[in-house]
Image (tube, rainbow, N blue to C red):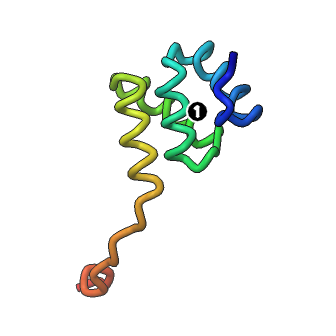
Amino acid sequence: MLDTGIKPEDTDAIELLTDRFALRPNHVQQLLDLALGDRLLVESALVVAREMGNPPYEGAHQYIVDVLRPAAPRDKKLDRAP
């Protein structure tokens, strides 16, 4: 029986990602929540994490955090050529 808080599209994503990437369902749900439900972002994060040799959940979590984190303001002095 499914948890009543899980949306049908999240259930589909969980089934796809647990089958494809061998993640535990609670990790997939956390990744979907972190990525605002964007399954493509979650999948790409998992692929990147796997390619870099990181554990799937931890590596994907860090990738998504990095992608979603607002970019730090750049120092304009560094943009100018000497």
Whether residue 41 is situated above or below residue 2 in the rendered picture: below
Whether residue 82 is situated above or below residue 33 in the rendered picture: below
Q: Camera-side residue: 70 or 28?
A: 28
Instruction: Give the residue at mark 1.
Output: 43
Rendered residue at 36%/42% (across/down): 62
Image quarter (top left, top right, bottom left or bottom right) of the C terminus: bottom left
Quadrant assignment, res 8: top right
Rendered residue at 59%/50% (across/down): 36
Quadrant assignment, res 60: top left
| Res 16 visible | no
Rendered residue at 63%/44% (across/down): 37
Image quarter (top left, top right, bottom left or bottom right) of the N terminus: top right
Q: Camera-side residue: 30 or 49?
A: 30
Decide if residue 23 is on the left or right side of residue 62.
Answer: right
Q: How many marks?
A: 1
Residue kind at label 1, given as amino acid type: Glu
Rendered residue at 33%/71% (across/down): 72
Residue 12 is situated, as x and y percent measured from the top left of the image, at: 73, 26
Residue 67 is situated, as x and y percent measured from the top left of the image, at: 46, 53
Question: Farthest residue toward the right?
Answer: 8
Q: Secondary structure at mark 1?
A: helix
| Res 48 visible | yes
Dot 1 surroundings within 10 Å: few (below 14), some, or many (20 or more)?
many
Q: Camera-side residue: 59 or 4?
A: 4
